[in-house]
Image: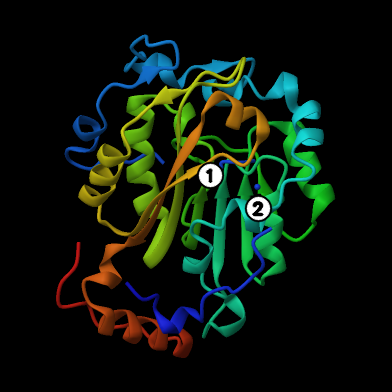
Amino acid sequence: MRPDPHLGRLSALPRHGPDDGTASDAPAGAEAELGPGVTSDGARADPGPAGTDAVGGLPQGAAGYAPLAEDLIRAWADLDAARLLSPILDLIPSPAEASRPLRALDLGAGDGRDVAFLAEQGWQATAVEPVAAFRQAGQARDPRPNWLDDALPDLPRLQDESFDLILLIGVWQHLQRVERARLIARLRDLCRPGGRLMISIRLGPAAEGRPVVQSDPAEVREAFARAGFALLRETDRGSIQPGNQARGVRWTWLALSERRADDDLRHWHRLIAADAAGRSPRPPRSGC
């Protein structure tokens, strides 16, 4: 599927990432499609509210990163954003050739490598990261992105916001089943019509101290389809980090588009033109 020309031509950049790569009602069927997760040691993940418990003031999925933050920042120093994002980089529009400013959101932004890359390309970028040491490193790396201390799945600090691009890189595996269903609904709210959503899904064992909840990429894809996202690409890649390579970790990348524009591209063209002129577009003939 071709990207919308009104969002600008696609990035053509050298392939030089971590690796690996609110609350609204969950979309009908999303929780059932995802199914109960399985942790890296084979145990069933707790599907109930315990998955959202905070640990030491942090969301459960982020708690394992805080004690290791300084070591991880050093370990990630040589990783390159364009190399990490290469499975889906050509599907990220170029703000320089768009008809209006484009907004990007990086969820679980870590030390800011990817969001700084987007800011360098001209995106109006927002980073969400609950670990204070990562936020500080990201702000020191590049002052342009807006950094928020917020947490998945509900993202309470992102009220009345919408974005043309959302990154969820190396994060999905830390969410429990009920959190995933809630996040899908929240992403639907945050993604502008025709916006892009990029997700990496970890396949393989966890790193020490950072347990993962395994998932089937096909079920994830189907859950997002039920929520109104169309698949642009699905691709499987090996890890670029030596430690993960030794563990046999692989990543499935999903590039998705908010379907309201995909159902009627002519409406998306009208919406962009109306947005630029400050007018309200007519509703689409079809959509979610």
Report how many numbered discs are placed on residues in the image: 2
Indicate the amino acid at tag 2. Asp
Residue 205, position in %: x, y?
49, 21
Indicate the amino acid at tag 1. Ile
Q: Which residue is rendered at x = 44% and y = 37% of the image?
A: 154
Residue indicated by mark 1: 169
Is residue 25 visible to the viewer in this orientation of the structure? no
Q: CA distance from mark 1 to mark 2?
A: 9 Å
Is residue 92 visible to the viewer in this orientation of the structure? yes
Horizontal placement of 283 versus 217: left or right? left
Q: Which quadrant would the N terminus be assigned to in this image?
A: bottom left
Horizontal placement of 115 versus 166: left or right? right
Residue 123, position in %: x, y?
62, 68
Q: Which residue is rendered at x = 32% and y = 41% of the image?
A: 24
Vertical comparison of 31 with 192: above or below: above
Horizontal placement of 194 versus 73: left or right? left
Badge 1 element? loop
Tell me which numbered mark, 1 or 2, is placed earlier along the sequence: 2
Q: Which residue is rendered at x = 56% and y = 58% of the image?
A: 86
Vertical comparison of 209 with 106: above or below: above
Residue 281, position in %: x, y?
31, 83
Q: Are marks 1 and 2 in contact (CB under 8 Å)?
A: yes
Residue 28 lies in what quarter of the image? top left
**Badge 1 density bin: few <14, some 14–19, many ≥20, Cα 10 Å:** many
What numbered label is drawn on residue 114? 2
Q: Which quadrant would the C terminus be assigned to in this image?
A: bottom left
**The one of 246 and 40 positioned closer to us in this rendering:** 246
**The one of 69 and 132 positioned closer to us in this rendering:** 69
**The one of 33 and 237 positioned closer to us in this rendering:** 237
Horizontal placement of 58 versus 35: left or right? right
Residue 266 lies in what quarter of the image? bottom left
